[in-house]
Amino acid sequence: MILGMTIITSEHIIGMVVTLILIMGVGIYAGSRVKTEADFSGSARKASGVLVAGTIMGTLVGGASTIGTAQLAFNFGLSAWWFTLGAGIGCAVLGLGMLKPLYASNKTTIPQYLVETYGYKIGPISSIFTSIGMFFNIIAQGIAAVALLTSAFHLNSTLALLISVILVIAYVLVGGLQGTALVGVVKLGLLYMTIIVASVVAYMMFGGYHGILESFPEHFPWFSLFGRGFSTDAAAGFSLLVGVISTQTYIQAVLSARSLGQARRGALLSAALIPPIGIGGILVGLYMRANVATFPGLKSSEVLPVFVLHYLPPLLGGVIMATLLIAVIGTWAGLNLGISTMLTRDIYVRFINPAADSIKTLRCQRIIIFVLCALAIILVRSSAGSLILGFSFMSMGLRGCTVLFPLLGAMFFKRWVTPAAGLASALLGPLTNFVWHFLFPQGMDPLYPGLIVGGLMLIIVSMLTRNQDDKTTGFSH
């Protein structure tokens, strides 16, 4: 934290309070429309394409896309774009290639969809590994929230984390998926204003395009999409692609649409709007790197909030700080909602209390959200100073290694894959990813071996067990 340099004025406070009141009003309105667990989780299928996009972006565009992107750009430059660029590509693939079979299935969670092809055993395995992957991204949001609050208000990190958790609980428990959707639409407008203003200010202070080039005479790594190395950055982008199409929260968003056309519209709208958001964070990160001597003691995670507080008009700066806070809290809350939906539907209802009614199911989901927040407090405190996008890329990769190949097999090769193959892929893919990460931290990105093992398991085990499966199930492929 940069003591004595970041000054919050009354105008900053006014801007933040007005923005937060606006967001709270939308959230309360959304909460008033939640009557059942189906409304809370999105299975009532009432959302328009705009609300679908709001849900996707309300979760996907958060601390990693803004504060994390500026942090990585401060350290490595243009390669920080891979988070929002990969996310946009993932939304496009989801909208153009995967929606029809998913929407027609009338399921609420990815594990429910997988169970239809591979049997009930794959449900808890995919739920647990996917939830672990999503939880890594919660840690990233926690780091971003702490950086935002400590740089703005000089709070100690523990108090900043507790405030963040309280906001997350309030955000998601009031409105569920409807709250995430409506607030996501409002947040989207405010975020675009934030990015446009920050981009323009940073660009002008650089003195334009030539000023940027002159500030970094050694163009590599600052102007390369592969500034951290081709393998590392290609894996980062690919992890976003496979993570988006394998994540409960984003699938849950498109399945909440009132029609297939609205679901596709929401996914493609997200694909178009997410990548440009990263540009603003990159410009700010580069500017702060070029002028790092002005800010002794600057932490890389504080780059974006410090820029906003120092270089933007106070009233506007307050609005933007509140917007960034809501972006982080919204993503954190959306991830909590996705994890709690899977664990409730695929473990609690299926194995613990099959007779649970809507009220008990909703109560269980909300208890899980409290537990997730408690775990986040412990793990975020132990991860202070880490790269925000590091956790985000790892999160997306682990989700993809769990779900990608079993999901594609169930969607497009249902006649050929077998229950044993789906189980092997969903279990060994993420385990390989996880083990590789700790055994070979300086080697190949764990995404590659995880996906290779997951894909090979689906193909090889299907070939070995297909005839046996035909005999035991009584039908042929």
Image (tube, rainbow, N blue to C red):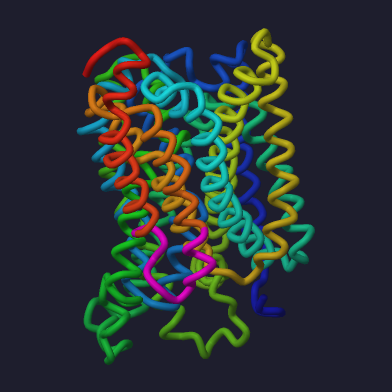
Q: Residue at (32%, 88%) from the top-left corner? A: 215
Picture quarter with the N terminus? bottom right
Seen at 77% across and 66% down, the residue is 156
Q: Residue at x 27, y 91 (%)?
A: 217
Which of the 4 image quarters holds residue 252?
top left
Q: Is residue 140 left or right of residue 105?
A: right
The front one of 207 and 386 is 386
Q: Of 363 and 355, which appears nearest the observer? A: 355
- On the image, which quarter does residue 173 sit in? top right
| Residue 52 falls inside the magenta stretch | no
- Expressed as whole percent of the image width and height from the top left, the position of residue 23 reads 57, 37
Horizontal placement of 80 versus 66: left or right? left
Front residue (pair 387, 54)? 387
Give the quarter of the figure containing the C terminus: top left
**Whether residue 463 is visible:** yes
Does 408 sit above or below residue 33? Answer: below
Question: Image quadrant of residue 471?
Answer: top left
Q: Nearer the viewer, residue 280 or 473?
A: 473
Please determine whether, in this image, residue 71 is positioned above or below residue 459: below
Give, as a single range, the part of the protein colored magenta.
435-448
Task: Decide if residue 408 is in sight here.
Answer: no
Q: Inspect the magenta stretch and tell me whether residue 445 lies in it.
A: yes
x and y percent of residue 95 in the render? 26, 33
In this view, 224 is above or below 324: below
Task: Please state if 318 lies on the left or on the right of 194 as rendered.
Answer: right
Expressed as whole percent of the image width and height from the top left, the position of residue 225 reads 27, 70
Number of residue marks: 0
| Residue 441 place in picture, x, y as percent | 49, 72
